[in-house]
Image (spheres, rainbow, N blue to C red):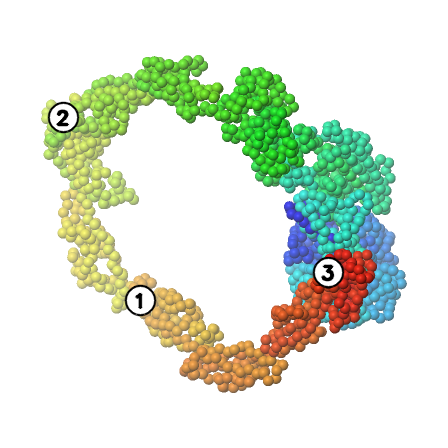
Amino acid sequence: MNKLAFLKKVSFLVIFLFCLASFAQLSKTHFIPPLTYADSDNAVPQDQYIYLSTPSVTDVAYTIIPVGQPTSTYISGVVSNASPVVIFIGNGDSQLFMPPTQTSTVTNNRGYIIEAQNSIYASVRMIAATTGAQAGALVSKGLAARGETFRIGSYTNENPQDNYLNFVSVMATENNTEVAFSNLPVGLIIENYSGTTPITVNLNKGESYTIATNSNESTINTDGLIGTLVNSDKPIVVNCGSANGSFHNGNGRDYGIDQIVGLDKVGTEYIFVKGDGYDGWENILIVAHYDNTSVSINGNAAIATINAGEYYLIEGDQYINGNMYVETSQPVFAYQGIGATPSEANQGMYFVPPLSCETRGNLNNIANIQSIGSIDFEGGVSIVTKAGATVTVNNIALSNFFTTGPTAVTGKSDYVTYKIVDLTGNISVQSTDELYCAYFNFNGAATSGSFYSGFPTPPEINFNAVFESLGNCIPNVTLEVANMDNFDSVEWFFDNGSGSGFVTTGITTFQITPTVSGTYKLVGELLCSGLKLESLEVPVSICPDDRDTDGIPDNIDIDNDNDGILNCTESYGNQIINLSNINSGSIPVGAYTFSGTTTVTNNTVTTPIFGNSEGIFTSEVSVKTGDPESSTTYQLNFNKPLNLLVSYPDTTFSGSGILNTNQEFIIRVPSSRTITLLDPDDQLLIDSDFDGIYETGITQISAFEIRFKSKTSLAFGAATFSFSSHGVNQITYIHKNISDTNGNQASFQIAATCVGKDNDLDGVDDSLDLDSDNDGIPDFIENQGELVILSNIDVDSNGLDDIYDITLLPIDTDNDGVPDYHDLDSDNDGIYDLIETSALGSNLSDTDLNGIDDGPNFGINGWTDNAETSADSNQIGYTLSDFDNNTVFSYIDLDADGDTCFDVIEAGFSDANMDNYLGDTATITVDINGLVTNASDGYTLPNSNYSTSATLSITTQPVDITICESYEASIAIISDESETFQWEISTDGTTWNTVIDDTNYNNSQTATLTIINTPITFNNNQYRVKLDRSGNGCGLYSESMTLTVNALSNVNSPVILIQCDDADPSTLGYSYFNLTEANDEISSNAINETFSYYLTEASAKLGDETSPDFIADPTTFINRTISNDIVWARVVNALNCGNIAEIQLNVSTTVIPSSLSITFNQCDDFLDIDGNDTANNNQRDGIATFDFSSVNTTLLSLIPAGQNPLPPRYYRNEADALAEINEITDISNYRNIGYPNSQIIYVRVDSSISNDCLGLGGHILLTVEPLPLANPVTITRACDDDSDGAYPFDTSNLESDILGTQNPADFNISYFDTAGDPLLYTDGTPVVSPISSTFLTSNQTITIRVTNATSSAPDGPCFDETTVEFIVDESPIANPTPSIIVCDGETGDIDDDGIFPFNTNNFSSTILGAQTGMDINYTYIDESGVTVTNSSLPNPLNSESQNILVEVTNPANTTCIATTTIELIVNPLPDFTVDSPLIVCTSDPNFSVNLDPIEASVIDSFTYEWYFEDGTFLSNQPTLDHVSAAGTYSVTLTKTDGTGCSRTRDIIVTASESANMTQDDVTIVDISNNNSVTIDTTNLGSGDYEYALREEGSNFITYQAEPVFTNVRPGFYTIYVKDDVCGTTELDISVIGYAKFFTPNGDSYNDFWQVKGLNAQTQPNSLIFIYDRYGKLLKQFLAGSTGWDGTFNGNPLPSDDYWFNVQLEDGRHFSGHFTLKR
């Protein structure tokens, strides 16, 4: 069981569980040997299940181990009381069942072992036979099943069949177990076996052996296996029975199997509860183990005497009233045949527990009693208990179930039996006394069952909670008795390991909290038998040390002080323990010595232990040969504590030493220490709770003693487990051989790990020392030079907080070979780290200036208390200095104040070589504390300048500058701290010269250096500045910058531009100029230069484009003065250096008249904007195609002769014409894109000789005529009003709608039909504009064309068209329906809500008649009062009275509607109520009631009819008086308003009576921890009762519904049973108990101790005896007396516990103890 899966960091409770009685089958371990069957269809097993349950209300983890199978097949989960589990485990031949052909062999791969964290019940249930006709079950007896002597039982098989088979199957619980099967009769034919008898086999744990006999093979075989003796030398578990078989002689059969217990748990008295079968198979099988064993039945004389191995079969006719008492003279094994029905095929066989006064407690619970897998059975239980015991099922009185009993037992009058059937679900059974309980279930011919309680077992210790991560240890553990009620007294014992053995703790309570480590056990006593039972011994350790409280024991914590430095780093490392001399030796470091002692028990080898120089030791143990133990013990004692690691070696030096399964080991350290096992690969089995059972899955555990064994034979080098212990001076190793046949050896290796070092000699190992050099700075800071806040996360649970990097070693800041956490001067600046903390004089002291804190208050963590927040808090209590706040602490910061001048200089110490370390040479030597030893100074109080910041910093460094030659430049630096500046210059970056002010430099000793009229020779000069400040002797240089000087552009100046004037006389002498045309004349490199243009020379030089003199659009510049102007161009080259040039502007005039205008018109075409026929066609975009090529001839004719003009050029606008850009090249196919509707085309005619203009102007007008708009018009659809298919549509507004806002005078309108012919009226005349106001037509679509009245377009006139659709639709008809009148509720619906479910199925067909294609909709009010419109009707329609509007609509035209209404009328029923139920008191003959209906209306009139429940007519009067008989009366009221609506109501008259209660009706459970009073309601009467219990002297009576009172204090009471009609009955009772203490101090309060519930009237002759703790009788008195006053012979006795024994007058007796307090 994987117990470690439940490791949680919580305290836990260890429960000592004495598994007696109903607790018997409760166990943490269950063994299930395999089963077998007859090889026949009638016996072959089918579905098989394991059922687990537990009393535990919390989850209990379990693991089901299929024997011999890999761990991957293990079944794990959790079970709780509320959630039992059912596990399907197979069918047919399986892990559970083996075929008979495989029996009689040692089997290592069948059966199960079930392990659980807490005690559980385990049972196996199965279906059998291919028809499912058989069933079987067994309940594991847990640890009670383990025994060494058994007698086998089975069916007797009187009419053997080939499918009858008897068997016995055993499983070993320990290795090397010898099992013998004897008393096998001669002639017995055993399946798959031909050897001799007796049969002897040797089994290891989990192995099994099965013997099977087919009853049909010989006469002997029918019952020859019964009485077989099974003996073993170690505990085994036995299953036996038949599969199939029968106790009768017919042809029926069934499974009869169970798990049995050993001879030590059987007895001489048995009570059996009969099932529901016939006597022929309701048999009792008694098997003797001793000769001359007599058998008697039901208290009669012995009827038979049998010898060992013989059996006696008792037939079912010996049952009396369903039970049977059997007594024998010697202990016997008892088996019971039980039937579920009158069919022989429905039988089973139980193994039955003997009677024992020790059998107490409750059964909680049987899982799913009615089921085997998914098949439902009828379930029940049989119960045996003491007479007078209160028995409940699921804590509910048995009267609530189908119960037979209590039934007295003939011959054993102090016992009774019960049988309860028809149970389902999870069943618990409770009894206030002994309890023996079996379950059964049956289905068809299949029956199963077994006993769930009754078998005693040795006590078992249960750790009833999860472990704390630090282990089963003090103070996390509390020991507790789980079943205290099973014992009369308990006492705790303790062994401290000193050799004196167990001594009493004096604690007799159910719980103890250990405070001292050692071994504990519990002794419980049962007075009824004098039996004393001892629990197993439980070692309880203190919790392993966890110095840093991180939850990881110091044993396995790799960083015990949470400083981030591994323990081994802070130590001498791991050291070999040389065991060449096994008796003594030493460790190379730390002055450790050891001595070894060896002892043996029954070990005969010559050399039981030997070792080698590598720390490997081998133990050898001889064969056990039947001895209880053969072992070697080796103990190592060390002169002082150290850390130890025990592991499995890679190789051994001699002998085998390989671990195997025949060995058990114990590793132990002193009980004040612990050792931790880490077994990550689960290679070991661990006895974690010291019960002798080794569990799997425990991968970590800590204790002072660990018991383990290997799962398998383990090769050297294959182990991953280890044992670690921290700070121990002793370790003990015990090797036990559990084999009786072979001796064995075992090898382990022991080493000292992380051997402690104390660097600062303060007595605390560095691994536990948070300040290993006592400089006041904790190691967790000096580890990596930073303050680390623990994450408290440790995913791999190795003790190193995950905030740390396990791969990092502690830093050595100054690389002097001494890590900082040992270094008193971590940065070798000559200043002690302690001084650089800045805590000197406050938290730290160093009066002798040696770098070590003076103390004297150092904590257990090795750190001075003054440096912590509180002593040993492990938290730094001061702020460690970081003067310059650069996140580097000052003690490792070579420039602590961050002023760039290093500490060694500012402290006043030597550093001639300027390497920032103390001393004048490059070679540094240090001592073991990291202090420099080859310097002339240092380690005195430093000059305070090292911590006084005189910072020199540069806010803004000089930056590289690029300027043009002859320009001015400024180089600047920003430093708030600098007090002086000096600029320097270098031409090569190496040699620097001071800059002084001259013709080219200004301000050379300020923050900004100015360079004037920069020459080209300064190109690539470098500049820097030296900063200085008082208090900082180091100064600071700035970064260098580079000056780049670029040359200017070469330009021609001036240049001339000439522009033509237009023909506008108002702008004579002014024209647009494109200044960019001068670029190529200004510079031959214009293409690579940038030009900008300005009105003035000054603006051009500045190049300021934000200036008002900047010419933003140089292509459309107009001269500012008539005929000429001057502007300036700025030319900037690729180096961004600018030059300027002058541009002179001249304007010439034109000769073309400005009045010349030529016009062209076109209709707007239905093309896209580019003139293509596409999806983007638009006839209203104002764009058309023009041909104005004829203009060329006209223009050229206007040019005077001799001008030699170039061909005219055409432009879209004047600006393009002036700039001579965007010329129109195709004037015969031009579209006016961008100029919709109209456009002026500009013409330019130039001279071919010069740039003089000859003509420029807008002389062409292009006009696009718009199309008219024929607006779309929709004519409303019409309904055919006379069914002729035509309709006179209103067209009076048709033409105005088509034209819209257009002027009718500008357009012509014409009409066409669908074929494109002129449209005609019905009389044949054409339709012309204006159209007639009414147009009679059937369905048709016409076309209407609108045309411009006038047009100049050659493709005109322009027109537009639209279509108009005329539609005539059919009109619907709504036929009427008659009113529908009903009574409310007449169809069985609710009769008082005014709502009736109307059938609407025929409404629509009635209304529509023969019409088709019409929609019908209803408007109505639904039953919620919501108006539903235009909807279909539900059927039925739940409706009040209402008129429903019906609309029939043509779906093609929803304006075509016909309507009607449907009237619904719901008449109400008579409205009245009745009082019901009414009660008559049958105990009062004069009691009667009047029955009177209560009418809601005083004005309505009704008729009345009264009937009794048998149909008898009683009256037609309004009331029925003087009713005294119980029953159901009905009254019917009918309305007389003509509707005939009526209603009937029932009045129930019930009978009641006052309670009839006697002492026989009351069960009192007293003298217990939970006294109770239960009233049996069976005979009280028929009243509706409430119950109260009033204590004597109390004035309060509180009634409750339940007749059970719990937690009742001892004393005298009155029971009240009240019926509200018939009154109250009273009964006085007594509840017996006693006070837990009394105080005889004379204050008249608690001065006497007496048993409560007894007095002079109630059992006055009861005797009471008082004893002291040693058994001395102090007082004897009668119950009627005042009691004991706490004296003996008149002398007061001291405060103490005293014991008593009470002999009640009614025959009962009890004992206990109480406390006398003074």
Task: Give the Cα distance between marks 2 and 3.
Answer: 139 Å
Residue 343 quadrant: bottom right
Q: Nearer the viewer, residue 1324 or 545?
A: 545
What residue is shown at x 85% (from left), y 66% (from top)?
Answer: 295
Return the mark for residue 1457.
Answer: 1
| Element under disc 2 | loop
Picture layout, residue 1354 above or below residue 1571: above
User: In screen coordinates, is 945 left or right of 1070?
Assistant: right
Residue 1311 quadrant: bottom left
| Element under disc 1 | strand
Picture layout, residue 1205 above or below residue 239: above
Give the mark, 1 or 2, whose residue is nearer the N terminus.
Answer: 2
Few, some or many C-alpha atoms within 10 Å of disc 3 (few <14, some 14-19, many ≥20)?
some
Q: Nearer the viewer, residue 1491 or 854?
A: 854
Few, some or many C-alpha atoms within 10 Å of disc 2 (few <14, some 14-19, many ≥20)?
some
Q: Nearer the viewer, residue 712 or 1694?
A: 1694
**Residue 347 visible in the picture:** no
Residue type (three-letter) at the residue carrying disc 2: Ile
Task: Give the Cα distance between marks 1 and 2.
Answer: 85 Å
Picture layout, residue 1303 above or below residue 653: below
Residue 1120 pos. (x, y %)? 17, 27
Task: Find the residue positioned furthest to the right.
Answer: 292
Nearest-to-viewer mark from 2 and 3: 3
Return the mark for residue 1641.
Answer: 3
Residue type (three-letter) at the residue carrying disc 3: Asn
What residue is shown at x 57% (from left), y 23% (from top)?
Answer: 941
Residue 1056 pos. (x, y %)? 19, 21
